[in-house]
Amino acid sequence: QNAVAEALDEEQARRTSQMVMTGVTEQLERSANQNEASAAIDDEQKRRMQEMNMKESMTQLERTAAQKDAAAAVDEEQKRRVSQAQLKEVNTELERSAAQKEAIQAMDEEQTVRTAMEAKSEMNTEVERKAAQKEVKAMADEEQ
């Protein structure tokens, strides 16, 4: 009876040990599965955060590029306007200079015409005076 009792005790100890081992194994498996699931959740969160950060960085880069493009366009437009204003100013100056040259040329031509007319008038007066003197001399010679 002692041997049977011992065998029963050993069997019960073996079953208890096996149940404890099964429980520990199941607990370890559950713990490992939970750790794995937790790691997967953490990885997914990190991936999403990286994706959000990447999108935010890309948006910022696009915004910066758009601002630079807009600033460049404004600079280009301003340069174009300045160039147009300078061209207008140069054009106006050229027109003014041409008008001054024309006015000076017209004044010179007028002066030349006046001088020629005055010289002609003086010559006519001189010719008339000489003719009158000749006529007076001729009349004086006739009277004598």
Image: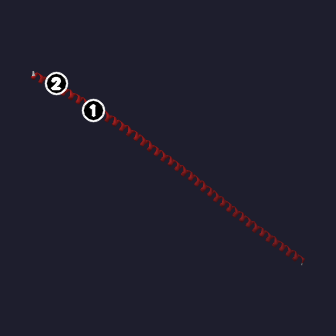
Q: Is residue 133 above or below residue 68?
A: below
Disc 1 packing (10 Å; few <14; some 14–19; many ≥20)? few
Residue type indicated by callout 1: Ser
Image check: 69 left or right of 22? right
Colour scheme of this structure image? secondary structure
Q: Which of the two labelled residues, at mark 2 and mark 1, occupies the earlier sequence position?
A: 2
- In which image quadrant can residue 93 be found? bottom right
Q: Is residue 97 above or below residue 13?
A: below
Q: Position of residue 23 (x, y in %)?
A: 23, 28
Q: Which residue is nearer to you in this view: 5 or 52? A: 5
Residue type indicated by callout 2: Gln
Q: Position of residue 39 (x, y in %)?
A: 31, 36
Mark 2 touches mark 1? (CB < 8 Å) = no
Per the image, label 1 sits on a secondary structure element best described as helix
Disc 2 packing (10 Å; few <14; some 14–19; many ≥20)? few
- In which image quadrant can residue 132 be found? bottom right
* Residue furthest to the right: 143
Residue bearing the label numbered 1: 31
Q: Which residue is nearer to you in this view: 80 or 134? A: 80
Image check: 35 left or right of 87? left
Image check: 25 left or right of 94? left
Residue pictured at 41% horizontal, 40% vertical: 55
Residue bearing the label numbered 2: 12
Looking at the rendered image, the disc whose residue lies closer to the viewer, 2 or 1, is 2
Q: Position of residue 34 (x, y in %)?
A: 30, 32
